[in-house]
Structures are given as structure tokens and as C-alpha cells.
Image (cartoon, rainbow, N blue to C red):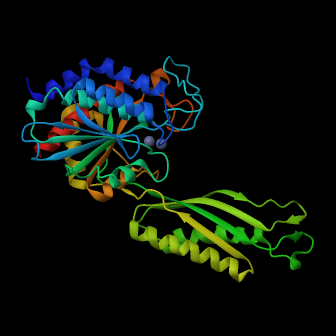
């Protein structure tokens, strides 16, 4: 039998098992960097497949190696994230979260169970490929500083060093059975901005005796939009949004301080560094010119995510070969952030989307909502495809 048919057949054979893994992980979600039981479950299953692995990497991370013939000829990494979110699940399903207030609302249960399925498939065909497949189960995608950066610090991209890395993420806009690819820039960097404007509080009827932090903060918010509209190269996507402003005065009280929080996202590292300097300088300059002071604290989030064009092109072609042209879509830029970006800054990477939507079954909720769920048929697609992508890339 041709290897492709064999992979498809294995994905179908183990699909019920993989649904079981997903339901177990979904029912027992753990927050970022607390994935102790999930990690133990992953380890236990890898052992049962006969896949050698190491545990407790960067806390709860697990790294496994599946070696074919001539294992040092080429190494490809596959990555899944394991953490859940602080959301109370509203779905009425048999596999509903039993950890109240914690939910797999970003599909990381899908990524982990799918990669376990891929491991099970690959461990049965080691006589049919050359090279090594490294499986990375990482903690903490949802929380700063990101499990990916900690795994890299712990040496996950060495001994053996993968030439490239492939990851998948669920997407609620894409129907189950389909996947999406994009070459080049894909997801944004995301930095958090915290600004405190310090004026002089007092009676609102005597503005000349005060330094009005509310008015100064308003000027700062409006002026900072110019960093995007006037300083950013129009060909670079960039977003600056403020989602929180707090000035605890009253109708007749000007507050001492106003506190502002926002997010800055873009897809160019040079511009990202420049923009952060401009934001600091402009906010401080406006505050100072109006008699106030201003603290600008910018917390660096994940970098932007780049799909190496040649790799993404090969992976898209392999997906077409495996799933059919009609099941492979092209993705737009996506201004959300993802810690897989850290791997993409180090080695050639391809991050693709796994469709999970099924309108007929009412499965349409987006990620990070309390009603997020998937059409579990997607697991067979994700499991088989990832195995196939790794095998094709080892041959490339
Ligand atoms: Zn998420
Ligand atoms: Zn996610």
C-alpha cells in the first residue's frame, strides 16, 4: 500500500481513540504553566505507543523523538500547546470541563490530542521514513512570557536540532475537514501598553489651580493614533487600541491620576521597536508640555509570526495531495498573536489552521468564548495531515 493511503487508513482507525484523548483533556483543563496532569497524561500515552520522550521541560513540557531509518539525516519538529483559559464552560456536553472556571476554549486540547494521534500513527511507520520527528508538547501559550520561549531556552531546538517546525491551530471560521495555509507574514506581535498620567487633582470648578489629568490623557490617546497613521509605513499592518481608561474623579473632582491600557500590534520587528519609542516619547512630551508627568510602561509580548514561504508552499502542496484541493484554503493576515512566533524567529516554521466549524451541528463559536466547541471530525483531519506533512518534509 502507498504510504499516503496507509497514513489515511491509520488516521481513520485511531480516530475514536483520539476523540477519547481530546475528551479527557477537555474535561480536565489546566491553566497556563499548571499543566501537570495533562503533561502526565501525554507522557503516559507516549509510553503506551512506545515513543521515547522527556518530561518536565520548562515545567510541564514534554519532548518526544520518533526515529525512522538513518535518524540523523534530517529532523522535523511538530508542536502542540497544552494550556487552557480562565473561562467557565457553558457547553452542555458529556466532556464538559470538570475544573470549574477553567476551559479549553482555544482548542489546545485539540492540538495536544491531535499530536498524540500523529505520534501513534508515526510510531507505526518508522520503517517507511528516513530522519527524526521531534514532538513538542509545550506549556503556557496563553500567558506571558509564553511556553514557547521557555522551551527554546530549555534547549528544545537543539540535540537534535530540527531544520523546521510545523504547528497547527483550530479556527472557528473554517469548516471541519478543511485547513488553511499562508506563506510569509501571518500573525502580529502584541505588546501591552500601560500609561499613567499624573497631574494635580482638585475642585473641578477651579481648573487653573489643577493639572487636569483627564484632559491630558485624552490628548495623549488621540495623538498616539498618529504613530500609526503618520509614522508607520502604510505597507506594514499595525494596530494601536486602548481598551481601558480609568480616572477616578467625579462630576466636580479632577482626579490626581489617569490610568490607560492598550495593545500595540504589528508585523515588522524594526517598526515595532521604533513605534514603542515613539509612543513613549509622544505620551511623555504631551504630558510634560501640559504640566503633568507620565509613566509609559510597555511590556513586550510575542513577536510576529512568519511562515517561511518555501516551507509553507511545500506544506500547502502536501495538504492538497492529502486532503484534496477543495479542502485547502488560503488565509488572510491575522492580527492576533501566538507564541509559536518564537520558533518562527529561530528556524523555518509553518503554522496552519485546522477547520473545526459545523453550522449544521450549531458549532460556530469563536475561540476564547464560553461556548467554544469543535466538530470532532476535525481530529482525524488534523492527526493524519500532520503525520503526512512531517513525512513529506523529511523527504524534501
Ligand atoms: Zn488562545
Ligand atoms: Zn490558542
Asked whether the viewer can see residue 76, the reply is yes
**Rendered residue at 37%/24% (across/down):** 21
Instruction: Give how far across and how far down residue 330 sits, in percent.
Output: 32, 45
Q: Is residue 247 above or below residue 57?
A: below
- For the point 87% across and 75% down, which residue is it? 207
Left or right of residue 353, residue 308 in this image: left
Closest to the observer, 367 or 343: 343
Out of 112 and 106, give the one closest to the viewer: 112
Left or right, 47 with respect to 75, comes to: right
Q: Quadrant of residue 233?
A: bottom left
**In-front residue for pair 376/128:** 128
Residue 235 image offset from top left, x and y in percent: 40, 66
Residue at the bottom extreme of this rendering: 289
* Residue 311 vertical position relative to residue 80 in the rendered view, above or below: below
Q: Which image quarter has ligand 2?
A: top left
Where is residue 144 shown, x and y percent of the image? 49, 52
Amino acid at each position: 500500500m502507498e504510504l499516503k493511503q496507509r497514513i489515511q487508513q491509520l488516521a481513520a482507525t485511531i480516530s475514536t481513540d483520539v476523540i477519547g484523548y481530546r475528551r479527557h483533556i477537555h474535561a480536565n483543563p489546566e491553566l497556563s504553566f499548571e499543566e501537570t496532569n495533562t503533561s502526565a497524561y501525554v507522557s503516559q500515552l507516549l509510553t503506551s505507543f512506545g515513543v521515547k520522550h522527556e518530561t518536565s521541560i520548562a515545567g510541564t513540557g514534554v519532548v518526544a523523538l520518533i526515529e525512522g531509518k538513518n535518524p540523523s539525516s534530517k529532523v522535523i519538529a511538530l508542536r502542540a500547546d497544552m494550556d487552557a483559559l480562565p473561562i467557565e464552560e457553558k457547553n452542555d456536553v458529556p466532556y464538559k470541563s470538570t475544573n470549574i472556571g477553567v476551559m479549553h476554549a482555544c482548542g489546545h486540547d485539540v492540538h495536544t490530542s491531535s499530536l498524540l494521534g500523529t505520534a501513534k500513527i508515526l510510531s507505526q511507520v518508522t520503517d517507511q521514513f528516513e530522519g527524526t520527528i521531534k514532538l513538542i508538547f509545550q506549556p503556557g501559550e496563553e500567558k506571558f512570557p509564553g511556553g514557547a520561549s521557555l522551551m527554546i531556552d530549555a534547549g528544545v531546538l537543539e540535540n537534535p536540532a530540527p531544520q523546521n517546525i510545523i504547528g497547527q491551530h483550530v479556527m472557528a471560521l473554517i469548516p471541519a475537514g478543511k485547513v488553511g495555509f499562508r506563506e510569509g507574514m501571518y500573525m502580529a506581535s502584541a505588546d501591552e501598553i500601560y500609561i499613567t498620567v499624573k497631574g494635580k487633582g482638585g475642585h473641578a470648578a477651579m481648573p487653573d489651580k489643577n493639572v487636569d489629568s483627564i484632559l491630558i490623557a485624552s490628548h495623549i490617546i488621540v495623538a498616539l493614533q498618529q504613530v500609526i497613521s503618520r509614522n508607520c509605513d502604510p505597507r506594514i499592518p499595525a494596530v494601536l487600541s486602548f481598551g481601558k481608561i480609568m480616572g477616578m474623579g467625579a462630576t466636580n473632582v479632577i482626579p490626581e491620576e489617569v490610568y490607560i491600557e492598550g495593545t500595540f500590534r504589528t508585523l515588522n520587528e524594526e517598526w515595532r521597536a521604533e513605534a514603542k519609542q515613539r509612543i513613549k516619547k509622544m505620551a511623555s512630551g504631551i504630558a510634560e508640555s501640559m504640566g503633568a508627568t507620565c509613566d509609559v510602561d510597555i511590556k513586550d509580548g510575542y513577536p510576529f509570526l512568519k511562515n517561511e514561504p518555501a516551507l509553507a508552499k511545500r506544506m500547502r502542496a502536501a495538504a492538497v495531495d492529502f486532503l484534496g484541493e477543495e479542502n485547502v484554503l488560503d488565509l488572510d493576515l491575522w492580527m492576533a498573536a501566538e507564541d509559536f512566533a518564537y520558533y518562527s524567529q529561530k528556524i523555518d516554521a509553518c503554522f496552519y489552521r485546522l477547520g473545526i466549524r459545523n453550522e449544521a451541528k450549531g458549532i460556530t463559536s469563536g475561540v476564547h468564548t464560553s461556548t467554544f466547541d469543535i466538530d470532532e471530525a476535525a481530529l482525524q483531519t488534523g492527526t493524519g495531515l500532520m503525520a503526512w506533512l512531517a513525512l513529506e518534509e523529511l523527504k524534501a
